[in-house]
Amino acid sequence: MKKSLIYLEPNNYQNSVDLLEVARQMYADDAYETYAVSFASCCREAEGLFDYLIEVLDQQIQNFDIINTTNVLEELQQVYQFDSILIPATHIGRMLAPRMAMRLHVGLVADVTAIKHTNGVLEMVRPAFSGKIMAGIVNRGRIPVMMSIRQNVFTYQLGESKNSLRIEYHPKPAEKSKIELLSISEKEKTNDIRDSEVLVSGGGGTMRYFRRLKLLADEMNSQVSASRRIVDSGIASRSIQVGQSGKTVAPRLYIALGIYGSLQHIEGLKNVESIISVNTNKHAPICSLSDIVVEGDAEEFIEKLVDKIKREKRICHENDG
Amino acid sequence: MRIICLIKFIPDVENFIYDYEKNVLVRENVRMVLNPDDASAVAYALKIKDKNPETYIEVVTMAPQGVMLQLEDLLRLNVDKATLISDKLYIGSDSYITSMILGKYLSGINFDCILTGTHALDGDTSHVPAQIAEILHIAQMSNIVKIEEQSFGCDSAVIEVDAEKVFVKYKVVLPAILSLQKESKYKLPFIKYKDIDLYVRNRIEIIDNEVLGYEQHEVGIRGSLTQVFSTFAKKMDKKDKLVVKNDEEGINTVFSFLKSKGYV
Ligand SMILES: Cc1cc2nc3c(=O)[nH]c(=O)nc-3n(C[C@H](O)[C@H](O)[C@H](O)COP(=O)(O)OP(=O)(O)OC[C@H]3O[C@@H](n4cnc5c(N)ncnc54)[C@H](O)[C@@H]3O)c2cc1C
Ligand SMILES: Nc1ncnc2c1ncn2[C@@H]1O[C@H](COP(=O)(O)O)[C@@H](O)[C@H]1O
């Protein structure tokens, strides 16, 4: 029976839980058990999905105190002998994983985005050279296999609900922390389209109702950008133009509404992970670069999607309350 | 105060050469540039030295001998010493072995603080700073955008960190490893005209395996715990697009996609 430990990062529980998909892909048909470890009381998101939920009971240890969290994970490794340890590649996870790997004298693969099996060998795939190439990395035999995993890449589809067993773990007394938190401040929202993780972008097809794009952008905490057609018509300012004579943007998601996708426009898109395009003409060039093409009117799309998001948020809210 | 800057020279990423047969990066004969995050680390150290001239700065890098010219330029900027850890045996070391080798050198010298970059543009693992901190059993923090100058003393430092959704201010006990990111906006100055040809070779120390004494099988590709097994170009451009309509099914497809990627 293989054992996999997943670190639940308090800043992103959902994403940590999704690492179950990595375990599933690693062990495929082998029998395996999943353990979650959390330094706070265990999150609801993990309930019923893991075989074991380990709650570390020491109020003193904070997630940024990597020396102490490493100490605890090392203790757990001695007790449970995990075959793999999976850590989300968050700001905190990317400091914890390497320290832990060095402590256990095992290799570590950073920022994994896919799992492959080649002739029985486990390949951990990650981007290299700013994403210009992908590399499949293998581990030289030492156990546990360790990796940090790129956020929001894997999604775990609920399997049958499990009877998660809670384990209350009392670690050895913590060392005095070498790091003290002084304050937390919100990031100021900038209006630069280059800083937005998602862009809701409008072109010639949105001329009559360009202002409505903001409704969708607001629901997704993102910004509105435009093609030159919109800017030249005086509907939007040059500062939000994407393209050769505008700005080069690298959002993770680009939603192209009524944009044809001329070369000069595409020129402004660098390392965009996904594109969704909405166009009355599904043969417009932008569509062949898209993950999803919605064939239809962009105004109608905005209205329906905003509606859907609002409805889902409400349902979520009611469940919380 | 003694500051060590761990710096890495990376192949000019825009024009790198990768040997797809052997799955190694061809580092010889490629123009090497200082990793941008690391430049911020050196820039900060120089800024401190500007204010407190008794500050001593040593840059340490593990790299092929070809980076000598770049090291000379740093010395002309008022860095006191450059240490080049270089040996044919070390070629192909993964992040674990690189950290072990650098860690062995660092364990033998004195310092008040180690400054590094957060991640390097080539490997982009961010492993080395945290792993060396483990070897030295000191604290480490990544994604630093500011180190308060007046706080930067011999026993602690106040730093500001970009923690994804928020900025966090911490106080860290020194010695520690503080890893800056280029967004900190600490920029290297230009070499003063009078120093352009300054002789600085005598301030570069080369350390090879004679000094560090590893067995052949412990380092390089053979010693590494991970190995590049295959490489392939990332498929960009044409995708297996999914075409849907503005109906309920289409909107649900879009919504599920957004949800699965964490956008809503
Ligand atoms: C030197 C130079 C520099 C340039 N620089 C830039 C630049 O920086 N940025 C830039 O964007 N352009 C630039 N251009 C212009 C570029 O060539 C295109 O003319 C421009 O991008 C077209 O904008 P568009 O796709 O929004 O509009 P259009 O070409 O008008 O395309 C509209 C699209 O919307 C679809 N559509 C129509 N109605 C609807 C509806 N109701 N719902 C959904 N879809 C609908 C249509 O099928 C079509 O695909 C430059 C041109 C030159 C010569
Ligand atoms: N070979 C090396 N020599 C010196 N410092 C290094 C080396 N590799 C990595 N570093 C340091 O570790 C940081 C993170 O690099 P990496 O772990 O490769 O992403 C860099 O910004 C450097 O400060």
Image (cartoon, coloured by chain):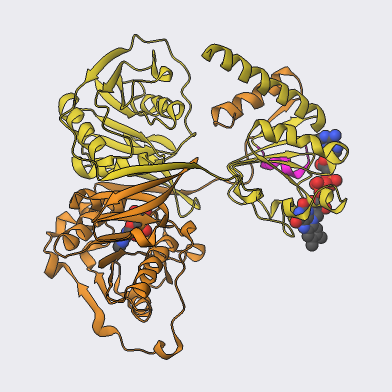
Chain colours: A yellow, B orange
Q: Could you tell me which residue is drawn at 19 percent across and 34 percent down?
A: A174
Residue A282 is inside the magenta segment: yes
Q: Position of residue A292 (x, y in %)?
A: 67, 32
**Quadrant position of residue A119:** top left
Q: Position of residue A281 (x, y in %)?
A: 82, 36
Please state if A177 lies on the left or on the right of A298 as rendered: left
Q: Is residue A142 above or below residue B93?
A: above
Q: Could you tell me which residue is drawn at 72 percent across and 54 percent down?
A: A243
Q: Which residues are magenta?
A: A281-290
Q: Position of residue A319 (x, y in %)?
A: 54, 12
Residue A248 visible (yes or no): yes
Residue A31 visible (yes or no): no
Q: Position of residue B183 (x, y in %)?
A: 49, 57
User: Quarter containing ligand 2?
Assistant: bottom left
Please state if A207 lies on the left or on the right of B150 as rendered: right
| Image quadrant occupied by the N terminus of chain B | bottom left
**Quadrant position of residue B157:** bottom left
Please state if A60 lies on the left or on the right of B121 as rendered: left
Residue A5 is inside the magenta segment: no
| Image quadrant occupied by the C terminus of chain B | top right
Between A1 and B163, the residue placed more toward the observer is: B163
Q: Could you tell me which residue is drawn at 20 percent across and 40 percent down?
A: A176
Q: Could you tell me which residue is drawn at 80 percent across and 39 percent down?
A: A258
| Residue most extreme to the front | B150
